Image (cartoon, helix red, strand yellow):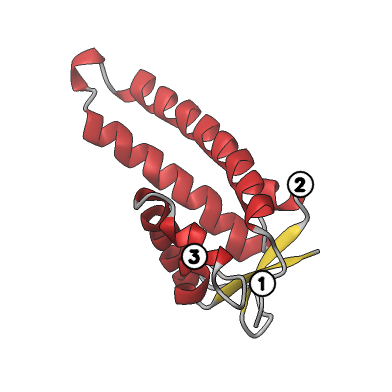
């Protein structure tokens, strides 16, 4: 089934959501570091892991529970399975990991949308999800 959402709209929501997710992650990291660690206990791997887990849970919880993040709500679209149902936790995990990979390799997974007849990105296609306008 075809996605109704343009790449520009998708990127707008993604920027909005990343600002929100990283703000949440900064707050959580700050609280954890203040509560449990002194300056010597801070490691880049620990901080990166907390950021990544926080961002993942922001997206996965939003997608599975409500079908949309705050950015998606602002840009007026939702995520659905190909059959129209809400996505599962497994699909959210696959989608998140593949979106990260899609972006990490120079955005090729997103650019793919411009050439796909169903208007899907790599992570849409491989997680069996699609974006639909509200």
User: Where does residue 30 sit, x and y in percent of width and height?
Assistant: 42, 23
> Alpha-carbon distance for marks 2 and 1?
18 Å
N-terminal-most mark, 1 or 3: 1
N-terminal-most mark, 3 or 2: 2
What residue sits right under mark 1 in the picture? 3
Q: How many labels does the image show?
A: 3
Point out the frontmost of discs 2 and 1: 1
Task: Provide the secondary structure element on which disc 1 rests.
Answer: loop
What residue sits right under mark 2 in the picture? 74
Question: For this rendering, which residue is in front, 24 or 98?
Answer: 98
User: Where does residue 93 sit, x and y in percent of width and height?
Assistant: 43, 64
Question: For this rendering, which residue is in front, 31 or 16?
Answer: 16
> Alpha-carbon distance for marks 1 and 3?
13 Å
Point out the frontmost of discs 3 and 2: 3
Query: Is residue 65 toward the left or the right of residue 4 in the image?
Result: left
Q: In the rendered image, which quarter is residue 113 located in? A: bottom right
**On-image quarter of the C terminus:** bottom right
């Amino acid at each position: 089934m075809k996605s109704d959402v343009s790449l520009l709209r998708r990127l707008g929501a993604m920027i909005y959501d990343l600002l929100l997710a990283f703000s949440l992650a900064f707050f959580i990291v700050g609280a954890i570091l203040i509560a449990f660690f002194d300056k010597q206990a801070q490691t880049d791997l620990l901080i990166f892991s907390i950021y990544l887990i926080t961002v993942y849970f922001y997206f996965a919880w939003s997608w599975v529970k409500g079908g949309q993040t705050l950015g998606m709500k602002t840009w007026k679209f939702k995520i659905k399975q190909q059959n129209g149902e809400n996505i599962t936790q497994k699909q959210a995990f696959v989608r998140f990991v593949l979106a990260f990979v899609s972006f990490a390799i120079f955005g090729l997974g997103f650019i793919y949308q411009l050439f796909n007849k169903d208007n899907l990105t790599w992570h849409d296609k491989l997680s069996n999800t699609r974006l639909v306008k509200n």
